[in-house]
Every structure is written in structure tokens, then in C-alpha cells.
Amino acid sequence: MMVAETAALRRSPLAHREAEFAELGQLVPRVSLREEPFLTQVNLRVHPGSPALARIERELGLTLPGRPNTVARVADGSSTALGSLTALGSLTALWLGPDEWLIVAPDGLAAELTERLAAALDGSLGSAVDVSANRTTLLLAGASARAVLESGCAVDLHPRAFGSGDCVQTMLARAQVVLWQLDDRPSYRILVRGSFADYLADWLSATIRTEGKSR
Amino acid sequence: MLLIECPWCGGRDETEFGYGGQAHVPYPEDPHALTDAQWAEYVFIRDNPRGPYAERWVHSAGCRRWFNAVRDTGTNDVKATYPIGARKPVTS
Ligand SMILES: [Zn+2]
């Protein structure tokens, strides 16, 4: 009940820039930028290869990615233990470290997800923590999206090195981000701390304008 | 700019990393048995070679894991990186 009461009071870090982002899209149609506010984010730590990890994978209905800087995804509406939850959208696990993942899901699932993960951990060494309020998400997509990112990111984002289903924790314009490519359009999700969101939005906005003039 | 190979994430810019000093400095088996001079030796005194030097780095802006690296202090060439707990690789 608390959730329902507080949900109406929430304000995402970039809510006040919605009109600006839309205007930017008119100005430079090759790339679009918008905030995806309030995504559920749960930080999961558990030993790789442990029985607890196997229980969690059963619970989530997906194999947690073991390869660094990749994601694993449960498709929309698939029938898993979390089927009722994923009916609301997809659930993705991002590799953050050899014993650490970030579970990203639609808004409103944090409480149930952390509860289920904690139950699956069942006292084993590990943790499942709701970190949804730590970062907000920017969705950058379109033909020029990669060029925009490349002017502020040292990681090789060329398709030969980075593609759909890959993620990196790195610096974008000197802000720490989790960058995650969703599809080959390309579309990227940029997860950034709330306190850095305005700065990063400023940088993205300026870079998109420059990109618009360069062709 | 140094390019450092994180054992987990691969090659990244030096600016993503933090430095942690000399690697493979064993914690004293019985700290209470140490004299002040021996404790000071453990806490403060480090090798300072010119040439290959095993040191600790942390991938702060990436996976946030500590690892070890062998860096040539004369040329800044990072000869090898390896996970904590692994033996120091032989470099020439
Ligand atoms: Zn790393």
C-alpha cells in the first residue's frame, strides 16, 4: 500500500526535460533521446557456481550471464516463475562483476523481486538490494546514436566489438554510466546516477545538436 | 594515456582505474608479535625498483574489482594483469 501512495509523489531526475528532449528529436531526427524513469533495478551478489545461484536462475527463469559485459534477457510475457511480473515487460540481467549482476525490470517490481531473490538466496552468502533510486535511465536511439556516444566514450562501440546484448560500465563524458545496447537500430540504454543525470543530459543535448550540424 | 587490461572487462583507459601500491605484501602472520619498527616496515615501506613492478589496481569506473598488474616503472609498459590470488606471471 505504501508503494501505491508514494508512487504518485515520485519525480524522476529528468522529468523537467521531457519537452526539451522532444524538441531535440524534431531538430535532429537521426537520433532520439528520452528518459525511461523508475525502472526496477536490483543489485544481486551471489557466488558463481553455487547452489544459491542455481536457485536464483530457476526463480528468474534465465541463466545469469557469466561472460563479462553481456546481458541475459527474459522475453516479454514468457512463462517463468516470474511470469506474472514479466507480463509487464522484459526482465534483464546485466553482468556487473564476476559475482554481481544488475536485474533490470519494469517499474513497480522491486519489492517482489528483492523478496523472491532473497528467498532464493535462502541465507547463502550474497545479497539482493533494491537500487532503483540509484540511477535513472536514458534511451538514446537512431542512426546517429553511436556517433553521439563515441564523442564521449573511449570504449569501442563499433558493431565488430559491441552489439545488441552487450553492456559496459564505463565513463561517458566523464560521468560513470552503465551503457547497454538493446538492438541494432541502434538503441542504447544509459543508466546514470540521479545526481549526474542533468549533467549528462546537458552533454547529450549539446552533442546531438553538434551531430545535427555535422551532416 | 595508459591502456590497462582489466582481467574481467578487457582493455580500458587508465582514467577508469585506481592505484593501490605494491602487490603481494603479505599481512604479518602474528601482528602482535611485531616490533614498532617491523610494523612500520609492513605498513609504510615499499620496494621502489626501476623495471617490472607488481602492483595493485582497481577498475573503479568499471567492474570495481581489484587485480594485480606488472608494470615497468621505467617505461610505464603494463606487462601483465592477473586476478587477485593468482601467482605473479613471469615477465621479461
Ligand atoms: Zn573491470
Image (spheres, rainbow, N blue to C red):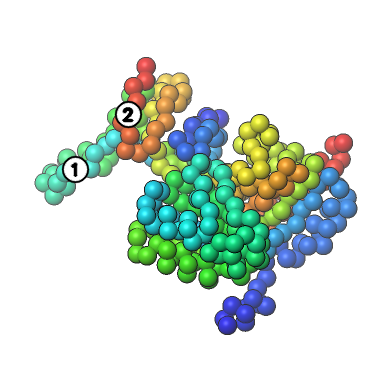
Report the quarter where the N terminus of chain A lies.
bottom right
Question: Distance of mark 2 from mark 1, alpha carbons?
Answer: 20 Å
Relative to A29, say whether A198 is above or below.
below
Q: Position of residue A94 (x, y in %)?
A: 55, 50
| Residue at the image point whose x is 44% and y is 45% from the top | A98
Q: Quadrant of residue B34?
A: top left
Image mark for residue A125? none
Q: Chain of mark 2?
A: B
Helix, strand or loop under label 2: loop
Q: Amino acid at mark 1?
A: Pro
Q: Position of residue B13 (x, y in %)?
A: 55, 34
Q: Residues within 10 Å of mark 2 (few under 14, many from 20)?
A: some
Relative to B16, say whether A22 is above or below.
below
Q: Which residue is mark 1?
A: B28
Relative to A29, say whether B4 is above or below.
above
| Residue at the image point whose x is 46% and y is 23% from the top | B77
Helix, strand or loop under label 1: loop
Q: Which residue is mark 2?
A: B88
Q: Residues within 10 Å of mark 1 (few under 14, many from 20)?
A: few
Q: Chain of mark 1?
A: B
| Residue at the image point whose x is 64% and y is 37% from the top | A162
Q: Position of residue A12 (x, y in %)?
A: 67, 66
Left or right of B34 on screen, residue A49: right
Q: Amino acid at mark 2?
A: Lys
Relative to A65, say whether B87 is above or below.
above
Do the dots labelled 2 and 1 sit on one chain? Answer: yes
**Mark 2 or 1, closer to the camera:** 2
Furthest residue to the front?
A79
The answer to whether residue A138 is visible is yes
